[in-house]
Amino acid sequence: MIEITRRIRLSESELKEEFIRASGPGGQNVNKVATAVRLSFDVAGSPSLAEEVRERLVRLAGRRLSKEGVLSIVAQRFRTQERNRLDARERLFDLIRRAAEPPVRRRATAVPRASRQERRDAKGRRAQVKARRARPSAEE
């Protein structure tokens, strides 16, 4: 079991890793060794996630989520399989941790009277500046 938060634990069997060839750095190995990692996690079918966490994770995942509800993370930042594997897992766990945090509800507040007055005064000053720019009328 992998502990992500105190309440969320994932089984190793829920994660599927596939090693693929990476683009970018790697020297002579880049065309021979599959160092990049594609980590897949079935968000829709995971028994480890509460429903509200699952919904937030779907929103956070964006285009990394397939139509079937599988989250796919590709890691190819490093030259070794192991470091890319750890990077992909850490990115997944960070995403789940962010989804586990309940959103902060906005408290409705009124705009203070002083702020409203200051805004009106600023508008008045600006109107005077613009009025002084105007061409003098025939009566003046």
Image (cartoon, rainbow, N blue to C red):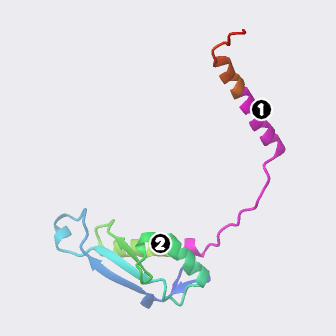
Residue highlighted by disc 1: 121
**Quarter-wise, where is residue 129 in the image?**
top right
| Type of amino acid at the residue the image marks with label 1 | Asp
- Front-most of residues 95 and 122: 122
Residue highlighted by disc 2: 61
Residue 5 in view (yes/no): no
Q: Circle 1 — which element?
A: helix
C-alpha gap between disc 2 and disc 1: 46 Å
Residue 65 in view (yes/no): yes
**Quarter-wise, where is residue 41 in the image?**
bottom left
Q: Residue 115, image x and y in percent?
A: 78, 41
Is 116 in the magenta?
yes
Q: Is the residue 1 above or below the residue 29 in the image?
A: below
Residue with the most extreme front position: 138
Q: Is residue 114 left or right of residue 105?
A: right
Q: Residue 52, image x and y in percent?
A: 61, 80
Label located before the other in sequence (2 or 1): 2
Which residue is depicted at the point 40% across and 78% down? 66
Q: Residue 87, image x and y in percent?
A: 40, 71
Q: Is the residue 127 above or below the residue 59 in the image?
A: above
Q: Circle 2 — which element?
A: helix
Q: Is residue 21 left or right of residue 83?
A: left
Is 138 in the magenta?
no
Q: Is the residue 121 above or below the residue 12 in the image?
A: above
Q: Is residue 113 left or right of residue 92?
A: right
- Front-most of residues 97 and 70: 70
Q: Quadrant of the C terminus?
A: top right
Crowdedness near tag 2: few (<14), some (14–19) or many (≥20) residues, C-alpha within 10 Å? some
Single out the mark in the foreground, 2 or 1. 1
Query: Could you say which disc has been placed on residue 67 in the image?
Result: none
Residue stretch in magenta: 97-125
